[in-house]
Amino acid sequence: RPLTKRICCIGAGYVGGPTCAVIAQQNPHIEVTVVDLDEVRIAQWRSSNLPIFEPGLSAIVEVTRDGTDGRQPNLFFSTAISAAIQQADIIFIAVNTPTKRMGVGAGSASDLGYVESAARMIANAAPADKIIVEKSTVPCGTAERLRSIFASLAPARSFSILSNPEFLAEGTAIKDLLNPDRVLIGSLKDDRSMSAARELASVYSWVPHDRVVHTNLYSSELAKLAANCLLAQRISSINSLSAICEATGADISEVANAVSLDQRIGRHMLKASAGFGGSCFKKDVLSLVYIAESLHLYDVANYWRAVNSINEHQKSRFTSRVISALHGTLLRKKITIFGWAYKKNTGDTRESASISVAAQLLAEGCELAVYDPQVSTNAQQIYRDLEDIGTNIRERVRVWDNAVDACVDACAVLILTEWDHFKTDMLADTSTLPENCTAASSDSGIDMLDDGLDLPTAKSVVHDAFNKSDRVDWCAIASVVQRPRLVFDGRGVVDPVALGALGFRVESIGKASVT
Ligand code: NAI
């Protein structure tokens, strides 16, 4: 039985919340308290309207926080940070580590201000020795800095500092936490630190022993950065190839499939897109660039910097393709964006490709309609994301909670998040479609298809492809958008043949333009 009775986690964000929910679920004998300075966030964690959307999360929170299945609640959310620190045996630091915005290293180095403030809170509040766990993604050497903060603020107490970076991916966080590829624990090698590492390992009671990897502190810190940088690099690699595909007639999905069959390459993270987003990849690449520069490894820094440059290039390339297909001018044209979250199954919009694409399109004078199955319920978030572009420009953005309404009179529909909701399933047999099964343009004012079929009949013909209840109704969209019914698929989620049968012209990332 593990020694740990109480855990405190500082930071109730995308990492702290789900991680602690699963730790509490798996360890009914451990009291887990997640604390944050943000009162609104804590109030949301205590309510039925959790601050983050993550498949499977609310069910676990209900059981552990509310004891709905008759078990003793052992997950708590609080702003009483000092009290939670005082009572805990293990304290996780899961605060944000954004890119520095000012001073030395601005625009590249990690801002460790939040980590340091958490450390100071611990030093001030902890009455005795504690195990401190770095969960946040930090540059290597951070644990050492923490040790010096504790040494100066609390010299009489000796804290064991461990690195235990989190590898969960948003959208699959619960699955990743319940079945992690590995749990990484970095520590010093003295007896006391090794004992702390074993105690932390015992908290991950549900993870097979051979998946718990022990390393030194630097390796653990660097491994997390390295993992994110390699993932980002892989996306930029496939995206750079997608540009060559579009110019040559090669098809990126065929190229990706062919290379993925090489076992040394494998099939993951080879999906071309309009660019990666999320709060981590860009900042972690920048952090590695800064580390390399600090070590005077300029060629190494330039190598990693290119990963982010290709990502910016990819977003601009996608936007340029839209502008060019719309004859070089967007003035007073309406464009619909499908997807605002940076990836599917999350409500997180941080660094979403949609934000950059939207800003570039708005600069051309268009009107934007935005629809996202998750984020549309929080329209203010979308306006906040566009804060930097000025109020008068934001007035040209309208958020819709219905896909078809968002598309009325649109000159183009851009798919920027790979929600299953936007998918068309491959038509099993296109010969079952009536010839010329294309929807009427909105200016006809009637829901009739070109060949005279009314929409309900056409829907029944193609319903397997388009009208699953959890899919957007592409048939209805065909009847409300402007001709030539342009769809720009920045995520490779729709079947161009299936949508072509409805009269759409689909321009897909990594495929040559349809002429
Ligand atoms: P977040 O921004 O969602 O949450 C961080 C929370 O920490 C905020 O609610 C903030 O108010 C709170 N906080 C900051 N300083 C505090 C203090 N001194 N006392 C109490 N609360 C404080 O961040 P997120 O996404 O959870 O990321 C946290 C860390 O985990 C970052 O280092 C990130 O790079 C890393 N990470 C993030 C992943 C993700 O998918 N979001 C995945 C793996 C690691």
Image (cartoon, grey):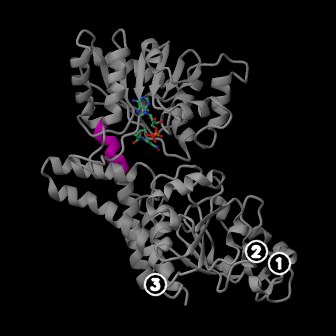
Amino acid bearing label 2: Cys
Is residue 462 part of the magenta span, yes or no?
A: no
> Where the C terminus falls, by quadrant?
bottom right
Q: Which residue is mark 2?
A: 475
Figure quadrant of residue 298: bottom left
At 75% from the left and 82% from the top, the residue drawn is 442
Give the magenta range: 221-228
Q: CA distance from mark 1 to mark 3?
A: 32 Å
Judge whether 354 appears above or below 446 on screen.
Answer: above
Asked if the residue at tag 2 contacts the one at tag 1, i.e. Cβ–Cβ closer than 8 Å, the answer is yes
At 36% from the left and 54% from the top, the residue drawn is 282
At 55% from the left and 57% from the top, the residue drawn is 383
If the picture is divided into quarters, which one holds ligand 1?
Answer: top left
Judge whether 123 appears above or below 111 on screen.
Answer: above
What secondary structure is found at the residue carrying circle 3?
loop
In the image, 336 versus 342, the foreground residue is 336
48 relative position to 202: left or right:
right
Crowd rating for badge 3 (residues with CA inside 10 Å; few <14, some 14–19, many 20+): few
Amino acid bearing label 1: Ala
Q: CA distance from mark 2 to mark 3?
A: 29 Å
